[in-house]
Image (cartoon, coloured by chain):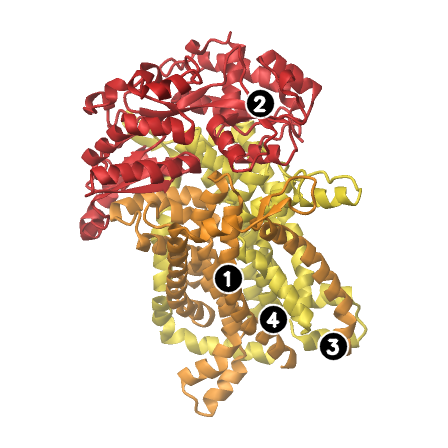
Amino acid sequence: MTRVMRLDWKGWLIAALLTVAILLPLVNVAVWSFTEVWRYPAVIPQKFGFRFWGDVLGRRDVRDAVMTSLSLAAIVTALSALICLPASYAFARMNFPGRNLFFMSFLTVYAFPKFGLYITIATIFIGLGLIGNFWGVVLIQLVSTLMFMVWIPVSAFQNVDRRQEEAARDVGASPLRVFWSITMPQVLPAITAAVLLTFVNTFYETEVAWLIGAPEVRTVPLLMIRFINSELIVQYGAILSLIMWVPSFLLLIVARRFLGAQALGRAFA
Amino acid sequence: MNRRQLIRCTFAAAALVAAPSVAFADVNRIDVYITGDSNIINFWNNIIKPAYESAHPEYTLNVVSARNAIAPIVERTLAALGTEVDPQVDIFDENDPNLPAGAIEKGLWVDFTEAGLQNYDKINPVTIETNYGLPYRGTQVVLAYDTTKLAPENAPKTWAELVAWMKENPGQFTHNRPDTGGSGGNFVRRAIHEANGRDPSLFRIDNYVQGESDELLAKGFELLKEIAPYTYGPGSYTADNMQSIQMLAQGVITMAPVWSDMALDAVNKGVLPETIAFTQLTDLAFAGGFADMTVPTNAGNLEATLKLADLVLSEEIQTKVVTEIGAFPAIGWEHLPEELASKYSNLQPASIPTFPGGPWVSAISDGWFRNVAPHVNR
Amino acid sequence: MSTVEAATAAVKRRHVDGRGLIGLLLVAAPVTLIGALILWPVSVSVFDTLTVRGPDGRHFSLESYRFFFSDGFSLRNLWLTIQVAAICTVLLLVISLPIALYLRFSETRLAGYIQALALFPLFVPSILLAYALIRTLGPNGTVDILLTAVGLPKIPSPYLTPWGPIIGLVWDNLPLTLLIILAGLSNVSRASIDAARDVGAGSFAVLWYIVLPRIRGTLLVAASFIILGLFSAFTLPYLLGPAVPEMMGPFMRRTIIEVDDPLQARTQAVVTFMICALFAMFYVRSVARTRREQSS
């Protein structure tokens, strides 16, 4: 416990620097959302107000977009976990022909510039009737989540303590039981991280949603781009992002329980 | 364009398999893609949509914002041409039918001279650039400036005065890049006009000749290079219309070219302070232009869409174009209510200098990025 | 550790026989998706850039690449992108590593706060970040307002200079980097560090001899993730960066939309892809080497 005390000045330093670097721009956005007039060089905005909040919350397109975004992100994340986690397990623990090649092929998702790729994909999708279609967006977003979902858990699966598994099996536990009680707790933090990243990346994704989804699929980030890029009142975008932080916060709190629990568990192991 | 054909061959078979899944789209929905800023989106949603839907209750308008991202949607429409697929695109509110190259030859766009629109003959002929685009609203670029730093009586009235003012006040002027938004693009075009005897008739939609025309543009770029050291930064050009307005609102710069309708809206909404005033160069105004609607021939609801285009050119809607968004009407003033004409027609310059689209767009954009933008760097 | 490795090897041997098919089945779905939606379109793109259509059909040509590599403007954009990517990667690793180390080896309340803070950029879409940064670090932005209020001179604003996108991209990529490094650090046991400390190793020695060798692979993964992402970044470079030189993301989009030259845009995409592939190869080789070392 003495080490914790000694490390602490580093903690405060990191916390202080991060607070300034991360929070300053965000607090700025939050203040702007309640501001009607704020001109240089006043430190305090000249005019506060809730006018823009009323404008944004009263819009039907905002509510529809929130629903679309949430269901899109949830479906993509669930599908991605469904097909990727078994694959991830296979990559980590099994040997099969072409394993390394297949494993590395996921890099291509990230390596080819997205814009060029999506334009080509869009021309393919149009023949399949997947343009302007919710499931078309799901499909292509699913592809862009594959790498995270496969790769992040792989190292965790590899690092699972095999001795514990062997021991459990030796005392007669079924493979499923071993997986659930021994393997799962050890890989849960990595899976949580992968799910978190997938959900968030899908939730805030714009290019696919636009190129493949327009005009049918309208997500919150698309609305936000419109608000910020072509609306004179930038505050609409600020308000929308504050609204979007609500689901994000909830997710982060849930995720932190697992991420943090791991650190604790490791420390005592 | 080869790729498209290649792909079309390969998915011809796939499309057959997937055919049942194609018929998703709501058949009575007209998809309208808007390139303009939000004032235009609101105009379509609040004025045109109710007017059209009450006249044709069987159809609904779906207004989609396509800002800065229209090209992929056009590509998508072109890819669907000649197939049975509904591209889910019925009309673009502001689009250059010359792009992508060859789209007209392939028959992508409706030829409005043959479309049988009732109101087509009312259009002010000076506003028509092409048979494949239907003008419906015009705006112009003006100079917005901060009267707390520049008294209105000293505001520049000619290009020469503007340059002189910039040299006396370095770092107080900026414009956005000519590839997006258009206010900066028309500032660049004004420089090109200036360098070529202020004669807009030199530039026509059909007279771009590679090499020869590039020399005309290069003269304009030379003028811009001359003033580049005196721009904000120097040489820091903002990304879009809005960023220029924000620089003005933050008091960072004194003057910027802006779209007249957008800047007026900004003052009305308090985004720009009341102390912002506007001026226009009198030796030759900044180029403006008319937004051209284009309709793809493979639109899912072609006939209904043409009725929509006709409605937009009606007296009713064109009056609202003047009163609601402060833009210029595309039909002649003689077709509009007399009181409106007497009140507003003198605001519209006898002719807004225009700069043609088509190959000129890419020549100017690419030329500016290659020649002017690298001239000074922070 | 050697017992673990021996056990691992034993398990592996047992799994080799007969389970190959199951393995293939388990990975079939994601691999198929990659093939159909990434590899196939990419091949079409590459094929397009390598051929021209003559009167007698398509034939092979390197013309579009010759143009790209002889065009100073394009090369300058590519060079800027590489520089920005390099600077961002170094900054991100240097910033993330201490934070990750702190988070890994402390369980104070402060750690929770730091972790929440460092992960928060995940929830800020880049379009909003761009505006937040313009308002904060831009000319006459919040930092300038605060400095002026206490009588200090204004900062030289990074807005519309190459530092604008660098700051934005570092901010944006911090959580991803941190998560990857944290995942890698879970391989480093506290016991091994304590053991080193007990024999008198200083903090730096612990970092250099104990921690870094174990997370070398992880750092490479993090670096390749960052670099690959940076090469197609669009919003932040476009809104925060200078008009020229452009990063490849805005450059590609402008080439396709404004210059109306899909072939050149595709060529730019393929060149970018090749550079990314190069990084990917470094990564693949290092992974392979680690595997060999482990199995020998």
Can I make out residue C213 in this image? Answer: no
Dot in front, 2 or 1:
1
Q: Secondary structure at mark 2?
A: helix
Q: Are marks 1 and 4 in contact (CB under 8 Å)?
A: no
- How many neighbours does mark 2 have within 10 angstroms: few (below 14), some (14-19), or many (20 or more)? many
Amino acid marked by disc 1: Val
- What is the CA distance from the residue labelled 2 to the residue labelled 1? 45 Å
Residue B181 disc label: none
Location of the C terminus of chain B (image quadrant): top right
Name the tint of chain C in the rendering: yellow
- What is the CA distance from the residue labelled 1 to the residue labelled 4? 30 Å
Amino acid marked by disc 2: Val
Chain in orange, by letter, is A
- How many neighbours does mark 3 have within 10 angstroms: few (below 14), some (14-19), or many (20 or more)? few
Residue C186 disc label: 4
Q: Secondary structure at mark 1?
A: helix
Q: Is residue A197 left or right of residue B332?
A: right
Q: Secondary structure at mark 3?
A: helix
Position above or below: A174 against B267: below
Dot in front, 2 or 3:
2
The residue positioned 47% from the left and 65% from the top of the image is A195
Q: Which chain does the numbered disc 2 sit on?
A: B
Chain in red, by letter, is B
